[in-house]
Image (tube, rainbow, N blue to C red):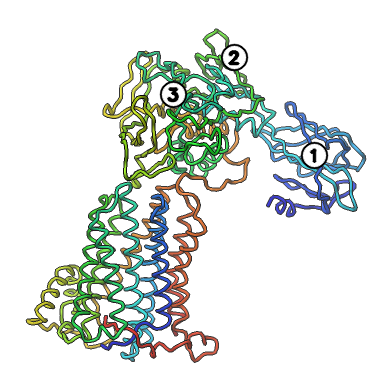
Amino acid sequence: MGSSGFLDPFNWIVLVITVVLTCYILAMSWDAPKSEAMYLHGILNVAAFAMMVAIGISKQIALVMKWKKNPEKYMTQHKQRHTFVNALAMVPAYAALYIGQRARSLPDKLSQANQILAIALVALVTLNFFLCVSSLGKSRKLSTYFAWGTGAVSAASTALLIADGPPPENTHHYLGITAVFMYQAILLRFFVSYAYEEDDMKNAKKTHFREGKTLQGLAWLAFSPIAYLGDGARMLRGWTGVRATPSKSKKAVGKYLDHIIWGFATFGVALGAVFTGIALYEEWYGTEEHTTHLFALAGAGLGAFVIVPLSSF
Amino acid sequence: MFFVALAAMVTKGHSNGQAISCTDGAYTFPSGVDSSLETVTTTCSGYDCTTQIQGKDTKGFVISTTHGTISTTTARISKNSNRCIVHKNNNEKSSIQFTWNPGQGDTFTSIYITLVSGKNGGNHKFGYNLRRLSNVGTVYVVGAGPGGLAAARWIHGHFPDSQLKVYERGNDPGASWYTRPISETSEANMAHNVMQSTSTDYNLASMVGGQQNINGAVYAPGTPKALAGSLGINVSEARYLQHTASTYVHHKDHMMWQCINPPDCDSLSFASSNAKMARRSIAYDLPGDIDLETGADVQYVNDTAISFYNDTVITLKEKDAVILAAGALVSPQLLGETEFDGWNHYYGFKQHFAHDDFQYDKQTFLYPDIEKNETELNIGKIAIPFQGNFWLEINMSMLPSIREHHVVGGNYTNPYPDLSQAWHFAGTMNHTRSKIHNYTRLFTGDAGALKTPFNCHTSLPAAAAGILAAHAAMGVPVGSLDAVPPTKAIKPPEPTVEELVVTYSWASLLAIYAVSDLNPGSKKKAIAAIEPIEQAVWGRLVF
C-alpha cells in the first residue's frame, strides 16, 4: 500500500465540477418550492449513485481486468479511478439527503443541531482535503484525529438528518435510508484508513476495517459504527493492544471480498432507491417531464458499465 | 411553427384540381403562396355550409372532412372516397355551398377549407378556415357554475354552430361583479339552501358563475394525476382538461383575481378583506352568444325530459344530451335522489398579530405533506373590524377518509367537528367517464363527478369535469380536437433551463472518465496524454 497521488488532472476537474455543481444546486434549493427542491434532491442522488458510484465500480471492474498481473499499477489506478470517485460521491449524496430532509420538513426547519453538524462536516471534509494534498498531513497524528472526527461527524449528521425529518413511509424512503447507511459504512472505513498510512500508527492497518475475510468483514461493515468507536478508543490510546488480523488473502488485486460484496450491495440498494424515488416524483407531482430527465441522467450514468471498460483498454 | 407545419403539407396548384392530393385531417395548400392571406368565412346551418373569400371570388378550393363525406352542387372533383372535394375548373365562384354527410356512428367532423382567389406574381393568393360540425342534437347544460360554464365554453368554442342551451337558477350578477373589490363579492349571496335544510352549511350562492363567483378565488386545480384518478381518466386527458380550464379564467400566483388600479395592488390580503383586487372567474367575459337563460329553475331531469319548477317541460330528442352541472349537492336531486354521500374538505386556522417566519408579499400556499399531498397551508393577511390586521394561516385537510351523508331536508353533519367544512362538496355522482350510471344521455359536469378527494380547490376540478362532460356529450375523444397542450401543473412546472443545465452537467463526469484512461500511445487517443496519471503526486489514498 503506497501513498500514490490521486489528484491527477482528470480528478481535479471532476472534483471542481462536483463541488461547484453541488453548491450551486444547494443554493438553488434554498428558497425553492418543495417540488422543485425534491427534483434537485433527485438530481444529486442520481449523480451520486447512478453516475459517480457507477463510474467508480465500472472503473474498478476494468482495472481488475487490465492490471491483474501488475499489482503496483493496479493500486495506483485503483485509488485514482475507484476510491477517489466513490469517496467524492459523498458530496452530492450528503447534499441530496440534506436537501431532501429539509424539503420534507417544510414548513418547519431542520433542527439547529442538524445545521451545526452539516457545517462542521463540510468544514472537516475541506480541512481533511487540504491536509491530505499538502505536506502538512504527512506523519502527523493530527491528520488522523481529523480524519476519524470527520467520519464520526459524517455518521452522526446522517443519522440525525434521518431522525429529525418525518418518518419513512414508502419503499423509496426505506431503500434510501438503507443505502445511505450502507454507503456510510464504507465511508467510515475510508475515513479510518486514509490518514493512518503515513502516520506513525502503523497498527491501524490491522484494525478490523482492513480485514478482508468475507463474512467477518461484512459483519464489521454492518456494525461499522461500533468498530469505528473501537478504533477511536484505540487511536486515543496510541493504538496499543491492537490484535493483528491479517488477511487470509495475500493477493493485491480483488483482495477485499467483503468490500466488493458490500459495495455491490450498496450500489444495488442505492439504485433501487433512485428508481423508486424517480417513480414517486411522478406519482406525487403528476409530471413526466422532470422524471424523464432524471431517468436520462441515470441511464447515462449506468452507461459507464459499457463505456468505461471499452475506453480502458 | 404553424407555417412550418403548413409548408410540410404544400401541394401543387392546378387550374382544375385533378392532380391535387387531399391531406386527410389537415389543410391542403397550393405551392408558391403569396405572403398575404385572404380572409375566408364559413357559415353553417345544420350540415349545410357556405364558404367564401371576403370581398373576392374563389377560383380554386380544397375542402376535406375527417369524418363522413362532403357533397356540393358546385363543379368539383371528389377524392379520398368523397371525404374531399376540389375545384373542377378555375371559373370565378362567389361562394361554395357544401354539405357534410355524417357516416354511421359519426358524432362530429372537422372540415378543413382552403380557397384560392388567384395569383399574384406567380404565387397563389389563398386563405383557409376550419369548421367543426356536430351530429349531436341540442346539448342542455343545467347550471352555470364553473363546471357548466366550462362545458358551455368548450362546446361553443369548438362547435359554434351546434345547438347549446344553458339554464341557471339564479341571476347574472352583471359586469360590476368583476370590477368592484373582491371583498364585496366574497361569500356574498350565499342564501340559497340547496338541501332545503335549516343548516346554514348548505347555504350556497345561486348565480351565473356559481360558488366560484363568491369564494376565496384560490386557483388550485390539483395535479393531473390526482384529477385523473378522481375522474377515472388517464393522466394525459386530465392534463388536457386542466390546461383547457386554465384558459377560461384569468389567474396569477395561485389566485383568480386582477388588480383594479395597478400598480396599487394587494396580492397578500384574503378575498374577504381585499379592496384592491377584482374577482375573475369562468363566468367573467363569457361569450355573449352563448344561449344562457337565467331564472330557469330545473326541478327534474331524466333521459326523456327536463322539467322546471314553473311546469315547463322540455322533451329530449333522440340525439340530445344533458350535462348536469348544478353543483355536487343539487345535481343528484335533479335525478330524484333524496339521500346521497359525498366528499368535502375541512380547515382550521391560526391568527397571528406578527409572525417572524411570515415575510410574504402575496398569498402563499405550502404543501408540507409531500407523501400524500394531504394538506394545504394558505397564508395571507386579513383585516378584522375593530381589531386590525392579522396574519391568517389556513390549514386545509384535503384527504378525508369519511364521506358526508346528505339528506334533503336534513341537517348538515360535519364528520370532523374539530374543523370547519370548506364548501368543497364533491363526489356525489356515479358515472363512468362522465356518463351517469343508469342513464343514456345524462352527463355529470360539476364537482359531483370527482370520485375521490384530492388536494385542490374544487372550482377548477369542477371545470375540468364540465369539459370532460362536454366531450362525452358531443362524442369527441378528450383532447382530440386540439394540439397536445404543454404540461400545465401547479407543481412543478416544466424543468427550467437552469434545472436542465444542473441535471445534464453531471454527465460531464462520465465523459471525463471515459477519456481518462484512453491509451496515450495511440494517435487517436492522444487526449489521454495530457499528463500520465503515474506522474501525479498530490494526495494519498490507501483504501
Give the residue furthest to the right: B91
Looking at the image, tell me whether mark 3 or mark 1 is earlier in sequence order.
1
Looking at the image, tell me whether mark 1 or mark 2 is earlier in sequence order.
1
The amino acid beneath tag 2 is: Ile
From the viewer's perspective, is the residue at label 3 or at label 1 nearer? 3
* Labels 3, 1: one chain: yes
Element class at badge 3? loop
Q: Residue at x 74, y 33 (%)?
A: B100
User: What residue did someone put label 2 on?
Assistant: B314
Q: Residue at x 53, y 14 (%)?
A: B297
Q: Is residue A79 above or below residue B121?
A: below
The answer to which of B281 and B321 lies nearer the viewer is B281
User: What residue did someone put label 1 on?
Assistant: B39
User: What residue did someone put label 3 on?
Assistant: B187
The answer to which of A160 and B308 lies nearer the viewer is A160
Q: CA distance from mark 1 to mark 2?
A: 40 Å
User: How far across and how far down the image is residue A235, in percent?
Assistant: 13, 78
The amino acid beneath tag 3 is: Glu
